[in-house]
Amino acid sequence: MATKLGEKEIENALKNLPGWQLTQGRIEKTYKFDSYAHGVSFAVRVALLAEKTNHHPDSLEIMWGRVKVAYVTHSAGGVTPLDLEAAAQVDALA
């Protein structure tokens, strides 16, 4: 089981993940796209990554020209290194 990180640990780690922020006990980022279709395509790639790594976003919200991705490890009761790793992998997809 992954270990829940403290707020300071998360904030320090987020310095290496531009655009990600700690909000309501989870980390999240909104990506911008020039069309709805590009956002949907990105969201599908995020979903496929989640299946491959067996670590799924808490939320994957598709809006026109934007996709919000959020992570928290519910079994640990907060953000864990798994969430930070997933965030970095999602950034690599963008």
Image (spheres, rainbow, N blue to C red):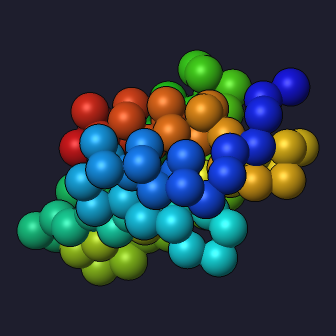
Residue farthest front in this picture: 8
Q: Height in image: 2 above or below 17?
A: above
> Residue at horizontal 62%, vertical 32%?
82
Q: Is residue 50 left or right of residue 34?
A: right
Q: In this view, does 44 lie to the left or right of 4?
A: left
Residue 15 makes an appearance in the image: yes
Viewer-nearest residue: 90 or 49: 90
Residue 59: percent from the left, percent from the top?
61, 62
Quarter of the picture holding the N terminus: top right
Residue 94: percent from the left, percent from the top?
23, 44
Residue 2: percent from the left, percent from the top?
78, 29
> Residue at horizontal 61%, vertical 59%?
7
Q: Height in image: 20 above or below 66?
A: above
Residue farthest left in this picture: 34
Q: In which quarter of the image is residue 53?
A: top right
> Residue at horizontal 17%, vertical 65%?
33
Q: Is residue 56 left or right of residue 47?
A: right
> Residue at horizontal 29%, vertical 79%?
64
Q: Height in image: 78 above or below 35?
A: above
Residue 42 makes an appearance in the image: no
Viewer-nearest residue: 34 or 93: 93
